[in-house]
Image (spheres, rainbow, N blue to C red):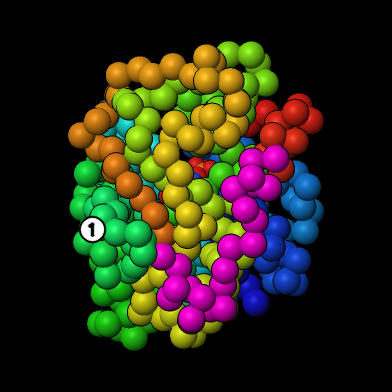
Amino acid sequence: MNILLTGGAGFIGRAVAKRLIEDDHKVWILDDLSNGQERNIAEFRNQLADFIIGDIKDEALLGKLFDEVKFDICYHLGASINVQDSIDDPRTTFNNDTIGTFYILEQCRKHEVKVVFMSTCMVYDRCNDKCGITEEHPIKPVSPYAGAKIAAENMVLSYYHAYGLPTVVIRPFNTYGPFQKTGGEGGVIAIFIKRKIDGEILTIYGDGTQTRDLLFVDDCARFVVEAGYSEAVNGEIVNAGLGRDISINDLAKLIVGDETRIKHVEHIHPQSEIPKLLCNYEKAKRLLGWEPKVTLEEGIAKTEAWIKEGHLN
Ligand SMILES: NC(=O)c1ccc[n+]([C@@H]2O[C@H](COP(=O)([O-])OP(=O)(O)OC[C@H]3O[C@@H](n4cnc5c(N)ncnc54)[C@H](O)[C@@H]3O)[C@@H](O)[C@H]2O)c1
């Protein structure tokens, strides 16, 4: 198939690209490199149909691209992803995550291209039961990031209902692994591992009792790709996660061992924190036959090995 992948030079996008290439598709990546990096795709750069440095908000560029190539699927991952950035500068997040998605949708409607929209577990309200968060669980836009994603999700589903366009909204839980950034704006596991290796203190926002369901990037990429291949998920919202949550306190202990190397600091956005996130992925299992394969302990070991090899993002 001819596949357009937005955000393909980013952390999850590059894993999705790799998988699509392994499945023998022709892949076009569109990424403005606002958070992605060319070195993320160096390994398979020459196997891509094209790598276009450009913005999903550039309607003229999108129009030309869709006129030139008859795409079969658009995996739309390009987005502003940082909760704190969305609080500091909601315009950028709204423009990229909501308006940018609308421009993608319009091209896909015109050219009848299936859309896989990458949303996030951050749209959910806190989890209150041990069975975890299903797709029917209440949503709550506690940050402009979540608000912008929910707005985009609704537009994506409206194109399914109003035009019969095959679209799917996917909500992976917090994802981690090689190629995630290890600095302040990166993921919690990458940051903690980097600090451990550098002999630094691991800092936790708030009391550390907030929990996360952490999904290894290869499992996440397999889920994303399968959502594009399957007709059973069209018009649906589908979760993917590990099905196990862990408090940030326990995660820090698991990574660094020594509790004296963990420090709690005042939360930067307590009002936008979700106290408990635990995924119920039964729907993904039922519709896609998808299940996570990598345990948290295995995933942390793989990520640590990658960072220790000297890779830094
Ligand atoms: N990391 C997670 O835990 C997680 C969990 C669930 C969902 N997601 C979603 O998955 C997607 C990928 O996230 P990631 O963690 O790989 O982040 P990332 O920042 O590494 O990837 C996003 C990519 O999109 C690109 N981009 C941003 N704005 C763009 C624009 N206007 N035009 C073109 N490209 C643009 C960035 O340069 C980057 O390469 C995002 O949609 C994110 O919301 C992430």
Residue under the image location 36 percent in, 64 percent down? 131
Q: Is residue 161 visible?
A: yes
State the quadrant of the N terminus: bottom right
Magenta residues, start to end: 280-301
The kind of secondary structure element at disc 1 is loop
Callout 1 crowding tier (Cα within 10 Å): few <14, some 14–19, many ≥20: some
In the foreground, 42 or 179:
179
In the foreground, 196 or 219:
196
Residue under the image location 51 percent in, 36 percent down? 251
Q: Amino acid at mark 1?
A: Ile
Residue under the image location 61 percent in, 59 percent down? 219
Q: Is residue 83 left or right of residue 292?
A: left
Asked if residue 293 lies in the magenta stretch, the reply is: yes
Where residue 278 appears, x then y in whole percent?
A: 39, 55
Q: Which residue is mark 1?
A: 139
State the quadrant of the C terminus: top right
